[in-house]
């Protein structure tokens, strides 16, 4: 099969590699589309994230067609359309034509979305679901969210709105992101343009000069300190990025905050496949009922090195404009 391989010199190459064959409890999938995530480029330049690298072929989510089945697999047949958050549990990453994954983490594609949209859901959907499940926020609780127009933020807002949470204040950095948030149902007086407004003062004013019950940080680094300062004493800080800073951690400690570190990887490491299956099933039901919609996607190229480099740079520059980036291997 063809795959994009990361070499020790940090360069990507399109190569011919062995096609993986499914073990007894695995299925082989011909990948039709693969989603890009910030962790993809972070694995190439960040020591902490590089530790998660299990294959020189990157990529952690996909949609496709079942092409072979292990002897002990039930519930799937060749030709089924599926989607999956493979993480580090696959035979290789998803920048490839084929992948073998445990059948326990694969879900049939909802019939209400395209196969390309299916590749945009697993990582952001599971991350958003885990955040909400662990937050346990009441409908009246105030929630401040940084970077809300990104992939995880988009899905998080859809799920919060679906559950009835309305007391939300969010940040965005450009007009296209703001438009995407308005399209989700967020009101203009709930959105802070962090490039034009003082985030701390504006957020407090919009929340009746009160600190927030919950803060969800989807950006980290510089904004993490401001986000931490906006949290009330004994509030809950949801860290999705692992990019908190010494200053933000000092603020959170002084507030006696509960910190929730959100990680899909933790469940894959322990082979808790039910986390993936149950989460994708919940998302599938919501999508089929049209209670939520899939992320807006942008197909930026085929299985080529240039596609990888382009996607990584857009993510690095935080210029997705509220869209999930997708690599399309093959049109159906």
Image (cartoon, rainbow, N blue to C red):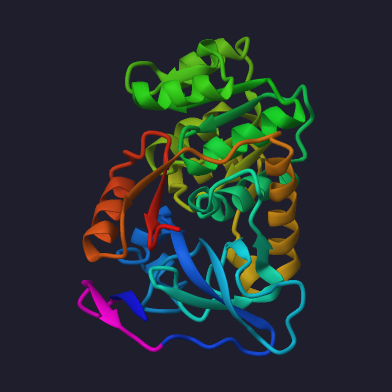
Q: Can the viewer see residue 170?
A: yes
Figure check: 149 above or below 268: above
- Seen in the image, is 158 located left or right of residue 46? right
Q: Residue at x 52, y 45 (%)?
A: 249
Magenta segment range?
6-18
Q: Position of residue 77 (x, y in %)?
A: 68, 74
Q: How many marks?
A: 0
Q: Residue at x 67, y 40 (%)?
A: 256
Q: Position of residue 31 (x, y in %)?
A: 47, 67
Figure check: 25 above or below 271: below
Q: Residue at x 66, y 50 (%)?
A: 110
Quarter of the picture holding the C terminus: bottom left
Quarter of the picture holding the N terminus: bottom left
Residue 145 is covered by the magenta coloring: no
Q: Residue at x 28, y 43 (%)?
A: 317
Q: Position of residue 91 (x, y in %)?
A: 51, 81
């Amino acid at each position: 099969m063809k795959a994009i391989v990361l070499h020790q010199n940090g360069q990507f190459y399109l190569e011919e590699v062995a096609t993986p064959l499914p073990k007894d409890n695995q299925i082989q999938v011909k990948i039709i589309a693969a989603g890009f995530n910030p962790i993809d480029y972070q694995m190439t330049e960040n020591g902490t994230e590089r530790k998660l690298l299990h294959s020189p072929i990157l990529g952690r989510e996909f949609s496709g067609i079942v092409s072979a089945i292990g002897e002990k697999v039930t519930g799937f047949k060749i030709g089924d359309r599926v989607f999956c958050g493979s993480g580090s549990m696959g035979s290789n990453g998803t920048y490839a034509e084929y992948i073998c994954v445990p059948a326990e983490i694969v879900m049939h594609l909802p019939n209400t979305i395209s196969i390309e949209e299916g590749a945009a859901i697993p990582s952001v959907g599971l991350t958003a679901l885990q955040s909400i499940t662990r937050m346990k926020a009441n409908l009246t609780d105030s929630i401040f969210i940084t970077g809300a127009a990104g992939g995880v933020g988009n899905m998080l807002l859809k799920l919060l709105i679906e559950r009835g949470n309305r007391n939300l204040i969010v940040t965005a950095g450009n007009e296209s992101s703001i438009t995407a948030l308005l399209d989700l149902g967020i009101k203009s007086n709930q959105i802070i343009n962090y490039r034009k407004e003082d985030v701390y003062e504006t957020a407090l004013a919009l929340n009746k000069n009160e600190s927030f019950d919950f803060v969800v940080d989807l950006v980290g680094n510089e904004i993490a300190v401001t986000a931490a300062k906006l949290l009330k004493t004994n509030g809950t800080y949801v860290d999705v990025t692992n990019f908190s800073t010494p200053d933000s951690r000092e603020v959170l400690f002084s507030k006696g905050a509960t910190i929730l570190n959100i990680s899909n990887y933790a469940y894959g490491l322990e082979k808790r496949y039910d986390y993936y299956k149950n989460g994708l099933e919940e998302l599938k039901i919501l999508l089929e009922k049209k209670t939520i919609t899939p992320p807006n996607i942008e197909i930026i190229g085929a299985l080529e090195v240039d596609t990888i480099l382009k996607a990584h740079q857009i993510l690095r520059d935080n210029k997705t404009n509220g869209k999930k980036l997708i690599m399309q291997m093959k049109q159906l």
